Image (cartoon, rainbow, N blue to C red):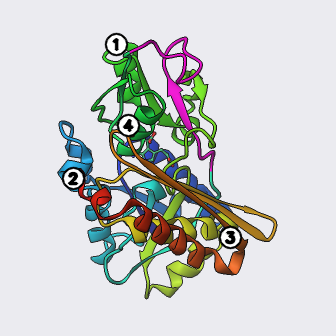
Amino acid sequence: MSILLRLGTRGSPLALVQARETRALLARAHGIAPERLEIRVIRTSGDMIQDRALSEAGGKGLFTKEIERALIDGEIDLAVHSAKDMPTLLPDGLVLSAFLEREDVRDALIAPGVASIEALPHGAVVGTAALRRQAMLKRLRPDLETMLFRGNVETRLRKIAEGQADATLLAVAGLKRLGMLDHASAILSEESFLPALGQGAICIETRADDAATNRLVGAIDHADTHLALRMERAFLAVLDGSCRTPIAGHARIEGGTVRFRGLILKPDGSEAHETARSGPLAEAEALGRSAGEELRTRGGPGFFTGT
Ligand SMILES: NCc1[nH]cc(CCC(=O)O)c1CC(=O)O
């Protein structure tokens, strides 16, 4: 049976689940055998860095660069990514052509027997690699210590089981997809712990001029998720000058209205600025940008230099 499309993905267990989900949706939408959709694993520089925070090693593009290279070179027809890991600027000629229906956007606390951030013992050590999580934890609990926690979801869960830290935070979406949500000791409300832009969403990247692939992929696009992600990415693009800035935000569609909250913080949680927007769907991207501009102004020049 001939291969119809080649799907590129990272090789982590979560990335593979996401690639298989994309393959299943495409096969069903077009009534084709899943074997005609080939999954190709591509190793990225992000997968090889274990000892430094990603923000220090070069930021988000680390998980996407090699996959985008394969897409540009025609070795694959589409790339499946976690939207959260996607830089706001894509290489020339590539587009995010579809977003799958979003999973839960919230973060989970993994701390055996502890049901909330408030209930963590004084001075507890929380392992995380995300600046946003570190800053939000410090904001809520300045007494907490944070330590760098790298590796995939399984690795981080193992580190907690071994007692390398008292707690960690992981996206509910990833835990659910891996069938590991039972490791969560609490699910943090969106109100108290605003998620990362793009969290819980899978996006599909293709070549802009590949009309055949774009038509096939268009069939599995989820309109509400797509619009919410366009808004979140417009917000992020305004603020993204430094990937050392903790940024959080979430857009949701309710009927004909889009509602957005966005937040920037200093890495130590000592300062935070939050804003909200709501309006008609047609204005989603413009509202996202205006929210970003407001926070950029309120943060002021010193905010984004890492001081
Ligand atoms: N940065 C790694 C990453 N990228 C996407 C997810 C989870 C799945 C998602 O948010 O869609 C994770 C792990 C985590 O933050 O728990």
Which residue is located at x 40 percent, y 61 percent? Answer: 86
- Residue 256 point in image, percent of width and height: 79, 71
Name the foreground residue: 206 vs 138.
Answer: 138
How many angstroms separate mark 1 from mark 4 (CA)?
21 Å
Q: Secondary structure at mark 4?
A: helix
Does label 2 or label 1 sit earlier along the sequence?
2
Check disc 1 and report the residue beneath it. Answer: 162
Name the foreground residue: 182 vs 125.
Answer: 125
**Which amino acid type is marked by label 1?**
Glu
Q: Is residue 134 magenta?
A: no
Instruction: Magenta stretch: give its range.
Output: 103-122
Q: Give the answer, above or below, for where 180 lies relative to 202.
A: above
Can you tell which quarter of the image residue 148 is in?
A: top left
Does label 3 or label 2 sit earlier along the sequence?
2
Q: Give the answer, above or below, for where 307 lies relative to 38.
A: above
Check disc 4 and report the residue beneath it. Answer: 134
Does label 4 or label 3 sit earlier along the sequence?
4
Mark 4 or 3, closer to the camera: 4
Mark 2 or 1, closer to the camera: 1
Does label 4 or label 2 sit earlier along the sequence?
2
CB within 8 Å, label 2 to label 1: no
**Which amino acid type is marked by label 2?**
Ser
Which residue is located at x 48 percent, y 18 percent? Answer: 111
How many angstroms separate mark 3 from mark 1 (CA)?
42 Å
**Which amino acid type is marked by label 4?**
Gln
Name the foreground residue: 121 vs 188.
Answer: 121
Q: Secondary structure at mark 1?
A: loop
Q: Give the answer, above or below, for where 211 lies relative to 304.
A: below
